[in-house]
Amino acid sequence: MTMLLHSTICAKPLVHELPHIRQHVSQFLHKAGIDDAFNHDLCLAIDEVCANIMLHGNINAESLINISLEYHDDCCRVIIEDNGVSFNPMDIPPTNMDDYFVNKQYGGLGIEIIRRIIDEMKYEHSQQQYPLNTLSLVKYFHSSRH
Amino acid sequence: MESQSFSIDTEQDGIAHILRLNGYLDASTSHILDEAIQQILTHSGKNMVIDCAHLSYISSAGLGIFMKHVNGVRSSGGDIVFCSMQKPVFTVFDLLGFPILYKIVDDQSQALSHFAGKE
């Protein structure tokens, strides 16, 4: 895995920042020559992660969400860091969509979208002066997902 | 940078309310859709055509709004039908299997025909 391009964006933990995050990610991927479908899917996965942090992370408004984008020869890696409450998306079991539709539930689909788009997901939490959540996402160019 | 705003134009066709979605439907804009659907339901509207011709983007927040209201709409004898979806939007619906739950048609006239057939 060789890294060819890298970019970082810092955003306030407010939902009106989501369009700016998506635009930054999309421009980075476009610059890397990545196709529109891959671009859309990765933007969506990052949007879902960030929206979760903003809405449920109980994060200090003065704090920032850091998003690091890496374009490698075979994949894109995204590292998202925040200082909100500890939350490992992989602790949420996969959603059975048949049951979901029967019960007419709503909400909770963001994690399922991430799971269906992303090939590898790794979560780490550390607690020093501040809590730090680090979520690493990898999507391969020749992914079997989506 | 291109603006990523969201707006809705609504129109009553007689047999259905048509909601034309424009722009980017995400966690920052989904409340606009929620309020628009709520307003239609409050005024006894039950059939809704969601015209997605100018909807460029949808995340789970937007899907959640449709799920929130579908029960109320169908229990009153109505339905929600989607039309004119751009590929990125359909991709998100399809990713989670939403075409099983909702009728998705090519254009507005087909969507209205769905309701006309139920009259």
Image: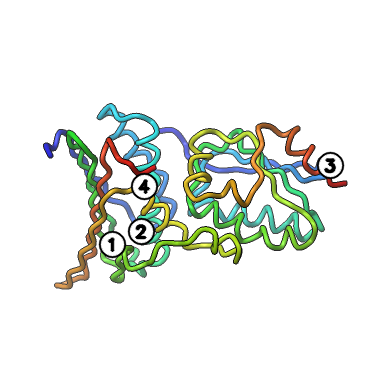
> Which residue lies under the disc numbered 4?
A117
Tag 1 residue:
A63
- Left or right? Give the position of A58 relative to A63: right
- State which quadrant residue A140 falls in: top left
Front residue (pair A124, B116): B116
Residue ID for mark 2: A13
Q: What residue type is labelled 3?
A: Gly
* Distance of label 4 from label 2 (alpha carbons): 23 Å
Kind of residue indicated by mark 1: Ser
Dot 4 and dot 2 residues touching (CB under 8 Å): no
Residue at mark 2: chain: A
User: Does B33 sit left or right of A49 as displayed?
Assistant: right
**Residue B74: image x %, image y %?**
74, 58
Q: Which amino acid does label 2 sit on?
A: Pro
* CA–CA distance in space, label 3 to label 4: 38 Å
> Contact, CB < 8 Å: mark 2 with mark 1?
yes
* Residue sitting nearer the eye, A4 or B117: B117
Q: Mark 3 lies on which chain?
A: B
